[in-house]
């Protein structure tokens, strides 16, 4: 008899590997992987999220039964004081996707993610160059200089028929610029960003809307530690995979955790979410999360700025603000929503209709 624990192990695998932060060239049209980067500014007033998709899981093209090819995309979000200022979600033809299976590298159109080493350290260089609404151009160059990374180099991340999560870099020093100009070069906005960041990589060979029921994750950086939580439940599973990852004193500790969600609320797009999350482990560690501020939402995901309190064996509460997200993909099956989803996506040389 296969136990619930065995099923969960088969459906979820973990690594923390720079070596495996490559493109895995999955051929199935519904297989996907993405490279996710985020950062909060030192003063807490600004946030950046950037995602490179080899197959855009939120696209009506990905969710169409008629399509048999992948849909590459990039997503860029810049928030100030808890509100979205710039949001760019753009699909590209398959021939504009480039990547390597020997090193971390992705190029989609004129947007790229690459890994580089310099005398002052090693990390990721991200460049976004694209047009968006009102004939404006977005020019972004940001660097994720690694502070915590590469803790668990394991081949488990390549399991077939499971969700593979690579916690590549829990913490990085992020610096760079975000410029907005018009087609003649006039500058509308010039942002110099500095803060603390995070990077992970997800891949799966299975079709997302028929695989994942609910998925919560988040991270926070404290002066002496980083905490990452992961609460992942597949359709048909009796239990969710719930993990706490504590990075402290140069080590990563992975722990199974108990999860409790309280004060259920509903976003304007209909997604239910708990305003309060609690994660506890058997080694006297506890993480409390207050999802105070929805900074982005849609029919299938929510992104929050959350107050996070971590208590370890020393009994000292540590408090800070971090980014948390919830993914509820079942609505991607509702074809009548496609036209609304499409209004936020730029494609075929045209800007998105909605900001």
Image: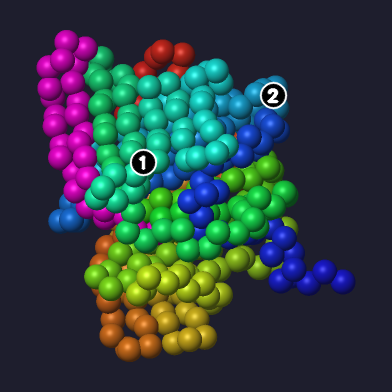
Q: Residue at x 26, y 31 (%)?
A: 140
Q: Quadrant of the N terminus?
A: bottom right
Q: Nearer the viewer, mark 1 or mark 2?
A: 1
Q: Label 2 neighbourhood size at 10 Å, few (<14), some (14-19), many (20+)?
A: few
Of the image marks 1 and 2, the number of the one nearer the N terminus: 2
- Where does the image place residue 92, in percent across and percent down from the top left? 48, 21
Which colour assignment does the render follow? rainbow
Q: Residue at x 42, y 64 (%)?
A: 228
Q: Quadrant of the C terminus?
A: top left
Residue segment shown in magenta: 170-196
Predominant SS of the magenta segment: strand
Give the quarter of the image for residue 346. Answer: top left
Q: Residue at x 20, y 36 (%)?
A: 177
- Where does the image place residue 129, in percent across and percent down from the top left? 31, 24
Total labels: the figure holds: 2
Residue 32 appears left or right of 47 = right
Give the quarter of the image for residue 264. Answer: bottom left
Instruction: Return the residue found at the far top.
Output: 184
Which of the pair 84/78 is nearer the observer?
Answer: 78
Q: Is residue 264 visible?
A: no
- Where does the image place residue 193, in percent across and percent down from the top left? 19, 44
- Where does the image place residue 104, in percent across and percent down from the top left? 47, 40
Secondary element at image label 1? strand
Residue 101 is one of the magenta-drawn residues? no
Instruction: Return the residue found at the far front.
Output: 119
Q: Label 1 neighbourhood size at 10 Å, few (<14), some (14-19), many (20+)?
A: some
Q: Is residue 98 above or below residue 185?
A: below
Q: Which residue is mark 1?
A: 116
Q: Is residue 196 above or below residue 263?
A: above
Q: Which residue is mark 2?
A: 68
């Amino acid at each position: 008899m296969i136990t619930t624990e065995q099923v969960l192990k088969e459906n979820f695998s973990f690594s923390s590997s720079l070596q495996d932060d490559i493109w895995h060239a999955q051929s199935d049209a519904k297989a996907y992987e993405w490279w996710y980067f985020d950062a909060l500014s030192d003063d807490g007033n600004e946030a950046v999220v950037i995602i490179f998709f080899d197959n855009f899981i939120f696209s009506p093209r990905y969710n169409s039964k008629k399509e048999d090819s992948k849909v590459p995309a990039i997503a860029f979000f810049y928030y100030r004081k808890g509100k979205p200022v710039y949001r760019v979600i753009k699909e590209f033809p398959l021939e504009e996707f480039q990547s390597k299976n020997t090193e971390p590298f992705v190029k989609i159109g004129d947007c790229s993610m690459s890994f580089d080493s310099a005398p002052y350290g090693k990390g990721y260089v991200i460049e976004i160059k694209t047009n968006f609404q009102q004939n404006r151009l977005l020019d972004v160059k940001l660097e994720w200089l690694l502070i915590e990374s590469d803790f668990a180099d394991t081949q488990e991340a390549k399991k077939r028929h499971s969700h593979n999560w690579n916690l590549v870099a829990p913490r990085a020093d992020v610096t760079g610029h975000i410029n907005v100009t018009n087609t003649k070069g006039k500058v509308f906005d010039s942002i110099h960003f500095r803060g603390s960041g995070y990077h992970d990589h997800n891949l799966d060979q299975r079709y997302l809307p028929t695989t994942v029921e609910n998925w919560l994750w988040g991270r926070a950086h404290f002066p002496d530690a980083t905490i990452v939580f992961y609460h992942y439940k597949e359709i048909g599973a009796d239990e969710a995979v719930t993990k706490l990852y504590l990075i402290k004193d140069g080590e990563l500790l992975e722990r199974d955790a108990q999860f409790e969600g309280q004060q259920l609320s509903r976003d304007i797009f209909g997604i239910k979410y708990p305003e309060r999350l609690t994660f506890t482990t058997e080694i006297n560690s506890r993480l409390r999360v207050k999802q105070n501020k929805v900074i982005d939402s849609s029919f299938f995901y929510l992104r929050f700025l959350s107050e996070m309190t971590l208590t370890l064996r020393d009994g000292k509460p540590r408090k800070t603000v971090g980014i948390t997200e919830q993914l509820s993909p079942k609505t991607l099956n509702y074809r009548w929503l496609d036209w609304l989803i499409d209004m936020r996506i730029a494609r075929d040389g045209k800007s998105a209709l909605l900001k």
